[in-house]
Amino acid sequence: MIKVERPKRTVTIKQDIRDGILSYCKMNHPNEGILILRGKAKKGLIFVDGLVIPPFSYSGPTFAGFPHSFLPFDPSYVGTVHSHPTGQAKPSVTDLHNFFGFVSVIVQAPYEDGDIFAYDRDGNPLEIAISPDKS
Ligand SMILES: [Zn+2]
């Protein structure tokens, strides 16, 4: 019998990018902030090493988004990150409906190091690893 194991999927975020995400969320508070994650995705492993402010983004206290149709096709766009100024960092139905790329990162207030979470397209949590910047 072959035991089928779910591949372990991890999102690795560079430390300065993580810090950038947290300060962007703080800046947008009490509204939601949204950013596009740049990086690489390979066999369930996602590496984030850049952030892009989406064109024509809109946000309010309980929503944030951008029209996907304005987005140029770019294989380095691996997902999005947005903040939840109120409540927990759990993907809402709207979040899953607007899923983009491979990962949805959600940051809950007060946007400290432990307030950052990642989910896949189905809303399953992914592990987050922070890599110290050395490159
Ligand atoms: Zn949300």
Image (cartoon, grey):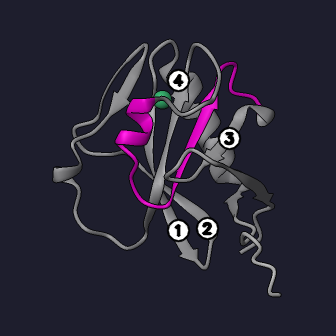
Dot 3: within a 10 Å radius of its alpha carbon, few (fewer than 14), some, or many (20 or more) residues?
many
In the rendered image, the quadrant that contains the N terminus is bottom right
Number of numbered discs: 4
Question: What's the CA distance linking mark 1 and mark 2?
Answer: 7 Å
Q: Residue at x 52, y 49 (%)?
A: 122
Q: Which callout, 3 or 4, points to the residue nearer the camera?
A: 3
Mark 2: secondary structure: strand
In the rendered view, does 56 fall on the left or right side of 19? Answer: left
Q: What numbered label is drawn on residue 117?
A: 3
Q: Earlier in the sequence, mark 1 or mark 3?
A: 1
In the rendered view, does 134 fall on the left or right side of 64? Answer: right
Note whether 122 is above or below 87 in the view shown: below
Specify whether residue 110 is painted magenta. Answer: yes
Over which residues does the magenta segment extend?
Answer: 93-112
Residue ID for mark 2: 46
x, y (%) of residue 22? Answer: 64, 35
Q: What numbered label is drawn on residue 15?
A: none
The amino acid type found where label 2 is placed reads Ile
Mark 4: secondary structure: helix
The amino acid type found where label 3 is placed reads Phe
Q: Earlier in the sequence, mark 1 or mark 2?
A: 1
Note whether 109 is above or below 54 in the view shown: above
Label 1 close to label 2 by CB (< 8 Å): yes
Q: Which callout, 1 or 2, points to the residue nearer the camera?
A: 2
